[in-house]
Image (spheres, rainbow, N blue to C red):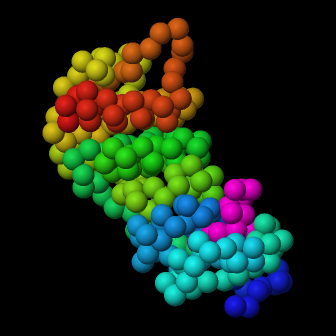
Amino acid sequence: MEIITSTDNKTVKHIGKLKQKKYRDEFGEFFIEGYKNVLDTCNAKPELVKHVVLSESAYAKDEIKRFFGKFDLTVLTDVLFSRLTETENAQGVLSVNTMPPPIFPAAKRCILLDRVRDPGNVGTILRTAVACEYDVVLNNCADMYSPKVVRSAMSAIVKSNVGINIAPRAIKDAGYELIVADMTGDNLFEAQCSQKYCIVIGNEADGVSESIRNEADRLLSVPQNNIESLNAAVAAAVMMYGLRYAGKQ
């Protein structure tokens, strides 16, 4: 296996460009870092994996052999690999992946994020949505394929079903009850929800926009004491699990 040593290599340049949204959008590609995340992605959605990139040190490890013969491999010197990664825990492994096409929600449960801008929140909510079997709609949110969101979401970035910038009215017209998370709403744990519903989580600073609140079928809140508000990802997790299980849906 040839070891790439030059920053002028076309593959190295291509991966470097994927750190920027304009190139991710242009190429329809993004990358995932870390042995476990890459392996899980390869197992879950092998058709999305364009190639696996390894550091020279990682290539010498026995566990890396599970990628051999299944995916196109590129090996870089350790120094060159470290220049491409966004984290110290990449373990010498990353994959370049095709972006799956966005979808309209199809599950009986979905969650809409309204201008959630923190990448960590978006990634964490994607992971929780996969765990709870919710489809996701991202309206004017942090780019889901940015390295920070991908790190937070881990392999949920390819396992989640995501729609982009879908009007709440279209979601309601598809039969979803629109439930807005709001501190003035009824107690989540006393609520009964319909068979098909969509939770709305708002912007970290401003909450859910007034236009979406006006579309809401109802407001629900997470009961809390002696604190102004919950982190958006925490509130989303409580709402998703609460309505799925405590709400008996």
Residue 56 drawn above or below residue 128: below
| Residue located at (29% from left, 54% from top) | 105
Check the image and report above or below for 37 versus 242.
Answer: below
The image position of residue 170, as x and y in percent, is: 27, 49
- The residue under the point 45% across, 48% down is 127
Asked whether residue 136 is in view, the answer is no
**Extreme-top residue of the structure:** 226
- Which quadrant, please, contains the C terminus? top left
Residue 174 at x, y percent in the picture? 20, 50
Magenta segment main secondary structure: loop
In the foreground, 218 or 33: 33
Q: Position of residue 209 (x, y in %)?
A: 44, 33
Specify whether residue 87 is painted magenta: yes
Relative depth, front residue between 224 and 186: 224
Q: In this rendering, is residue 34 above or below 50? A: above
Residue 204 seen in render: yes
Q: Relative to 88, is 215 on the left or the right? A: left
- 221 or 39: nearer the eye? 39
Identify the residue at horizontal 74%, vertical 68% (top origin).
84
The tally of labels here is 0
Q: Is residue 200 magenta?
A: no
Q: Quadrant of the N terminus?
A: bottom right
User: Residue at the bottom extreme?
Assistant: 2
Indicate the quadrant where residue 93 lies. bottom right
The span shown in magenta is 84-95
